[in-house]
Amino acid sequence: MGLRNIPTETPAQLASLVTARPGMVASRSLTRDADSSMTLLAFSAGESVSEEVYPQDVMYYLVEGRVTVTLPQRCVDMQAGDVLCVPAGVPSAVAGADSAAGFKLLQVAVPTNK
């Protein structure tokens, strides 16, 4: 997996690499690979990801804010610093737990080991 769009000369805070504008979701791709992806997402207040199903295992790492990940049998509340894996083929949706605040999320999708 080739990395891109990450500082190489001096370190930076991960959260500083992407900023959402009101009413928008901003993203920054951090990889260059056909089979896997690593994307940093910034959601403004009230924005969310509707239910999606990925062919890869997906790791959500919450960089800032609070979110609820909705899975078929349960909802999982996350706060900054939490990490959650959603197995390939399992539907999931992500929404801010506080409708008045945005959040930043690192999403990493990797092929399953079968």
Image (cartoon, rainbow, N blue to C red):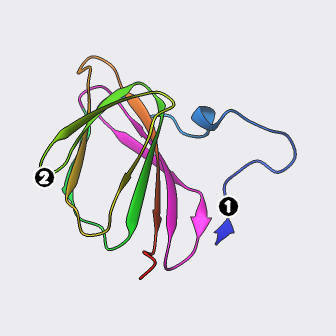
Number of the front mark, 2 or 1: 2
Residue 87 vs 39, above or below: the answer is below
Could you classify mark 2 by the number of other residues whose Cα lies within 10 Å: few (under 14), some (14-19), or many (20 or more)?
Answer: few
- Labels 2 and 1: the sequence-earlier one: 1
The quadrant holding residue 56 is: bottom left
x 40%, y 30%: residue: 103
Q: In terms of secondary structure, where does tag 1 sit?
A: loop
In the rendered image, residue 42, in percent from the top left (x then y), is placed at: 43, 38
Instruction: State the mark number for residue 4.
Output: 1
Residue 102 vs 91, above or below: the answer is above
Q: In terms of secondary structure, where does tag 2 sit?
A: loop
In the rendered image, residue 114, in percent from the top left (x then y), is placed at: 41, 83
Could you classify mark 1 by the number of other residues whose Cα lies within 10 Å: few (under 14), some (14-19), or many (20 or more)?
Answer: few
Amino acid at pointer 2:
Pro
Amino acid at pointer 1:
Arg
Residue 110 vs 47, above or below: the answer is below
x 82%, y 51%: residue: 8
Farthest-out residue, bottom? 114
Residue 51 vs 79, above or below: the answer is below
Q: Is residue 29 magenta?
A: yes
Q: Is residue 30 magenta?
A: yes
Farthest-out residue, left? 73
Instruction: State the mark number for residue 76.
Output: none
x 59%, y 57%: residue: 30
Q: Which residues are magenta?
A: 23-46
Tag 2 residue: 72
Q: Depth check: give the residue in front, 57 or 7.
A: 57
Residue 60 relative to residue 70: left or right: right
**Distance Cα–Cα, label 2 vs label 1:** 33 Å
Residue 101 relative to residue 10: left or right: left
Quadrant (top left, top right, bottom left, bottom right) of the N terminus: bottom right
x 61%, y 40%: residue: 17
